[in-house]
Image (spheres, grey):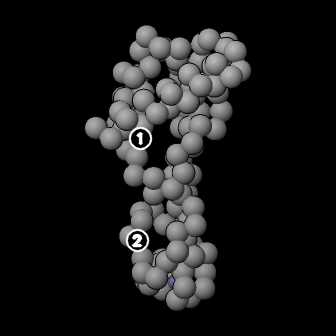
Amino acid sequence: MHEMSICEGILDVLKEQARAQNFDTVKRVCLEIGPLSGVEIDALKFGFDVVMRDSIADGATLDIIETEGKAWCFSCGTAIVIGERYDPCPKCGSHQLQVTGGEELRIKELEVN
Ligand SMILES: [Zn+2]
């Protein structure tokens, strides 16, 4: 499962941060996830609990902020919001879009001890 390896990547970042900033427990992780990141949020939540078990983030709360998918439509010259990567422009139906946001998967906040 793709989300498991994402969680392992998050744990690596947490460990690095713990070393750099001298904390040893993570209480809360807040992630920002865009709809175009390809991440399934339910799977990520499940993977998070499994991967964090017995680590510095054992039992940590996972908060997820879902951002919007944003794109620029070349046909009608409008900034639009899309739900999925291959969605057409909601204004003119064009597929000539440049994705400008919504691909993010990042740690936005950490609460540590
Ligand atoms: Zn358009």
Classify residue 79 as left or right of residue 105. Answer: right
Q: Which residue is label 1 attached to?
A: 41
For the point 39% across and 23% down, the residue is 51
Identity of the residue drawn at 49% across and 77% down: 97
Q: Is residue 81 left or right of residue 8?
A: right
Mark with earlier residue (2, 1): 1
Residue 60 visible somewhere in the drawing: yes
Q: Amino acid at mark 1?
A: Ile
Mark 2 burial class by Cα count in 10 Å: few <14, some 14-19, many 20+:
few
Give the numbered dot on residue 87: 2
On the image, the x and y values in percent for residue 41 come to: 41, 41
Image quadrant in which the N terminus is located:
top left
Question: Mark number for residue 12?
Answer: none
Q: Which element is circle 1 on?
A: helix
Q: Secondary structure at mark 2?
A: loop
Single out the residue that lies furthest toward the bottom.
75
Residue ranking furthest to the right? 21
Q: Residue at x 53, y 14 (%)?
A: 56
45 up-or-down from 105: above or below: above
